[in-house]
Image (cartoon, helix red, strand yellow):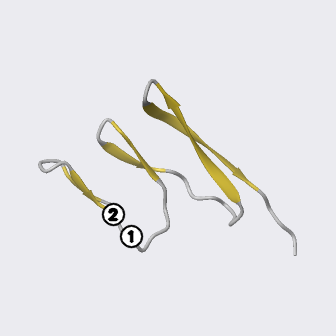
Amino acid sequence: MKIDQEKMTVEINLMENATYYVVDGVPKKVDDLPTSFGSQTIAWQQGKPVGFDIHYTSRKR
């Protein structure tokens, strides 16, 4: 991720599967799931994201 503070722009790699949220103009990347089965939930308070939860399931084959 490349940030240009003067122009207030951010360059991200679109080839990377990722989830981002922005707090006060600063992008934050949500942690990846440890396995390929799960969900990411972003918690909001007073119109701003305040954190996230990650839930995942391990599957045996």
Does dot 1 land on a helix, a strand or a loop? loop
Query: Disc 2 to disc 1, how far (Cα)?
Result: 6 Å
Say few, some or many: other residues with alpha carbon within 10 Å of mark 1 (under 14 / 14 to 19 / 20 or more).
few
Secondary structure category for the residue under label 2:
loop
Left-right relation of 60 to 2: right
The residue positioned farthest toward the right in the image shown: 61
Rendered view: 8 above or below 43: below
Assign the C terminus to one quadrant of the image: bottom right
Please state which of residues 17 and 3 is positioned toward the viewer in this rendering.
17
Amino acid found under the numbered disc labelled 2: Ile
Mark 2 Cα-neighbour bin, 10 Å: few <14, some 14–19, many ≥20: few
Report the disc number at residue 12.
2
The residue located at (80%, 62%) in the rendering is: 58
List the single residue furthest toward the front. Answer: 47
In the rendered view, does 14 fall on the left or right side of 11? right
At horizontal 57% and vertical 58% (from top left) the residue drawn is 32
Three-letter amino acid code at the position of disc 1 = Leu
Q: Position of residue 53 (x, y in %)?
A: 62, 42
Side of 18 where 10 appears, left or right: left
The spot of residue 39 in percent (x, y) is: 66, 53
Which residue of the protein is positioned furthest toward the top in this rendering?
46
Q: Quadrant of residue 26?
A: top left
Residue 51 shown left or right of residue 3 in the figure: right
In the figure, 37 relative to 15: above or below?
Answer: above
Q: Position of residue 7 (x, y in %)?
A: 13, 51
- Label 1 near label 2: C-beta < 8 Å? yes
Residue labelled with disc 1: 14
* Residue at (45% x, 24% y) in the render: 46
Residue drawn where x is 78% and y is 58% of the image: 57
